[in-house]
Amino acid sequence: MPTDIPQIVEVQKKFFKSGKTLDVKFRLCHLKKLYHAIKDNLDIIHDGLKKDLGKSASESYMCETGLVLSELSHIIKHIKKYAAPQRVKTPLAQSVSQSYRLPSPYGTVLIMSPWNYPFLLCMDPLIAAVAAGNTVVLKTSAYSPKTNEAIKKVISETFEEDYVAVIFGGAQVNAELFDTKFDYIFFTGSKTVGKLVYEKAAASLTPVTLELGGKSPCIVDETANIPLAAKRIVWGKFLNLGQTCVAPDYIMCAQEIHDKLISEIKKQIAKQFGQDALKNSDYGKIINEKHFKRILSLIDGDKVVCGGRYVAETLKIEPTVMDGVDFTDAVMQEEIFGPVLPVITYRSLDEVIDYVGGHDAPLALYLFSTDKKQIKKITSCLGFGGGCINDTVVHLATSNMPFGGFKESGMGAYHGKFGFDTFTHYKSIVNKKNVIDLPMRYQPFIKTHDKMVKYFLR
């Protein structure tokens, strides 16, 4: 098989044109093979995630492999329904005909996955693309080499390279991919690279899905269940050491509950990670030295009220809470993507709406409240990709809702049927019968025909 990118794409396009992937049974067979390949290689996948990110097997299954298996189960169960032509209502003017939408794959698609959830975020879009009938070039992140090896093993046990190919490499490989014509591009990663992908795709009019990120706010109002809020915020924030695109980036809390919330967050950090998280074998690590140093540069020691310690040799930073933060601090100028949690107080909900609404739309938004009016106000007035009321992160763990960004945090969505739709073009088709041919659309136009047209089109 060819090893360079243009040849791989050429071979995949030839395979797609053979029509084999149009057969739903063919797709289903490979999705089932993928399911069993993942099950058979769980230990290897989890070992890769442990070496790359320090994730325990339990966290890896809960947040990566288990979610992928769940997504596969959903698609395997529903693919025949998703791939079937969809009958739609035919207007009276088109009587004696059938109208339907025919799901059709784009062709050869490029999926670019990130390093923070290197298995989940390459497999989920891959499942959708294969289910929709495409061939796939899968580009993994250079920052997660051990997980990449596991991915390569799983894919090679399931697909031929002319169907799904895995490509490794860094910026030079990315540049070559950007200069290659694909039929669709699905990218998950930073806004900086996302802009480049969008620019390159625009040059060839290639459709894209961009799953980016941003500073996702966590709002805690005066009616919230503070102990439960603290428990769920700590879990969502420090999961994968904060290296989660939908992690709560910062807290905005009502002034009257500020002290209690800080106290409960400290308790939860100790309860969930122990008195010394740096010695907790289930507490992961920062992906590399570059990001480790970047995160440390965001910490203002004078504002740290919990944590702040780190071990450079193991790339670990303990769960850190900064209080008394204001909007000019370094930690509020970029997405943190690490185990640092700034806390800002507010006096009125309008302050929150003004601040969040005045900045780039976040990928996620979290609100802890029992006040229905305040919940409605926040969820209605602010733009964001998705989120939770009285919880964090879990909105992405379902195949029944789309997951995606909004405005600056991305475009497009996937999971379940929504993922199938992302990689599908729906052809709108009218199948007209020959038994009746209404004369009113043909010239010469006469008044009786005009009356008939007005009757049908009103």
Image (cartoon, rainbow, N blue to C red):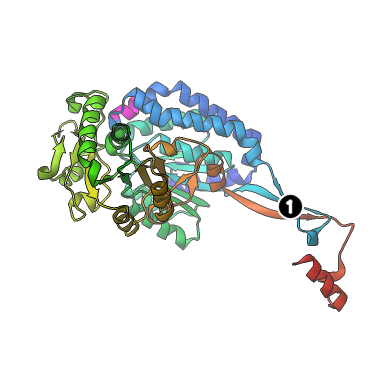
Q: Quadrant of residue 138?
A: top left
x 23%, y 46%: residue = 255
- Residue 161 x, y percent position in the rendering: 50, 37
x 33%, y 29%: residue = 49
| Residue 111 on the magenta segment | no
Q: Label 1: few (<14), some or many (≥20) within 10 Å? A: few
Q: Quadrant of residue 146?
A: top left
Looking at the rendered structure, the kind of residue marked 1 is: Lys
Position of 67 with respect to 353 (left or right) is right
- Residue 203 x, y percent position in the rendering: 45, 62
**SS of the residue at dot 1?**
loop
Position of 345 with respect to 87 (left or right) is left
- Residue 457 x, y percent position in the rendering: 76, 67
Eyeballing the image, is 97 above or below 397? below
Regarding residue 20, the answer to whether it shows in the image is no
- Residue 35 x, y percent position in the rendering: 51, 27
Eyeballing the image, is 378 above or below 233? below
Residue extending furthest toward the right: 435
Q: For the magenta stretch, what is the residue range?
A: 47-51
Tell which of 351 and 417 is nearer to you.
351
Dominant secondary structure (helix, strand or loop) of the stretch shown in magenta: helix
Regarding residue 402, the answer to whether it shows in the image is yes
x 61%, y 36%: residue = 79
x 49%, y 60%: residue = 204
Tell which of 192 and 224 is nearer to you.
224
Eyeballing the image, is 81 above or below 51? below
Mark 1 lies on residue: 89
Q: Quadrant of residue 151?
A: top left
Position of 11 with respect to 230 (left or right) is right
The C terminus - image quarter: bottom right
